[in-house]
């Protein structure tokens, strides 16, 4: 059965899902804090940054805390508050905008130092107290890249210890 499903999926992908033209799928995908942090840890391994660990702690109401542990000695972990400011709009503006804060004005000062100098992951850009995530650029080179062309909507929400992705996909007719 696995071989049949794999063969079918490969055929559908090779034709850009033409045999399913007009199909629409909406999904709500709750992602546990543990899985989010596994993905973040893997992304950190691929970068040379002064960050040892980031612990993402989703809260209610489209906000989360990120506890950032730096590799610098004598610097305690930093708790960064993050709020979803603007959802991506597909396909016109597929950028998720997050606003972050760290100890009041310290975050704005810190962003002046990290923004231009710190290499961010692909598709991620720091602009003052905003973190902009270009979804197609961030997904490039990952298995998720195959789905981006079918996205008609994506919203990122949070609940206690969960990141919730609401996705609408469509295969054009």
Image: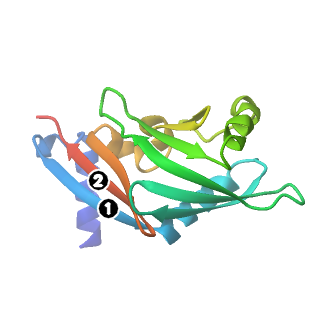
For image coordinates 31% across by 37% down, the residue present is: 149
Distance in Å between CA atoms under marks 1 and 2: 6 Å
Residue 166, which numbered label?
Answer: 2
Q: Is residue 136 visible?
A: yes
User: In the visual, does 154 lie left or right of 17?
Assistant: right
User: In the visual, does 139 lie left or right of 30?
Assistant: right
For image coordinates 52% across by 71% down, the residue present is: 34
Dot 1 or dot 2, earlier in sequence: 1
Q: Where in the figure is residue 12, as x and y percent of width and height?
A: 22, 48
Quadrant (top left, top right, bottom left, bottom right) of the N terminus: bottom left
Q: Where in the figure is residue 10, as x and y percent of width and height?
A: 29, 52
User: In the visual, does 52 lie left or right of 17?
Assistant: right
Which image quarter: residue 78?
A: bottom right
Mark 1 and 2 residues: CB-CB less than 8 Å, in contact? yes
Looking at the picture, tell me which residue is in the foreground, 107 or 22: 107
For image coordinates 59% across by 37% down, the residue present is: 129
Q: Where in the figure is residue 15, as x and y percent of width and height?
A: 23, 40
| Above/below status of 59 relative to 151 | below
Looking at the picture, tell me which residue is in the foreground, 8 or 156: 156
Q: Where in the figure is residue 51, as x and y percent of width and height?
A: 74, 53
The residue wearing badge 1 is: 29
Which image quarter: residue 94?
A: top left
């Amino acid at each position: 059965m696995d071989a049949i499903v794999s063969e079918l999926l490969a055929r559908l992908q090779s034709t850009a899902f033409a045999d399913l033209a007009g199909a629409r799928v909406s999904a709500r995908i709750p992602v546990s804090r543990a899985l989010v942090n596994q993905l973040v840890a893997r992304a950190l391994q691929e970068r040379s940054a002064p960050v040892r660990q980031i612990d993402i702690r989703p809260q209610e109401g489209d906000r989360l805390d990120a506890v950032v542990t730096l590799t610098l000695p004598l610097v305690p972990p930093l708790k960064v508050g993050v709020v979803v400011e603007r959802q991506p709009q597909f396909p016109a503006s597929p950028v998720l905008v997050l606003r972050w804060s760290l100890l009041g004005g310290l975050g704005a000062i810190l962003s002046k130092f990290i923004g231009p100098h710190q290499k961010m992951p692909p598709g991620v850009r720091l602009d003052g107290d905003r973190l902009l995530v270009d979804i197609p650029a961030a997904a490039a080179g990952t298995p998720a890249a195959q789905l981006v062309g079918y996205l008609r909507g994506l919203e990122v929400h949070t609940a206690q210890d969960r990141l919730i992705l609401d996705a609408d996909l469509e295969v054009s007719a």
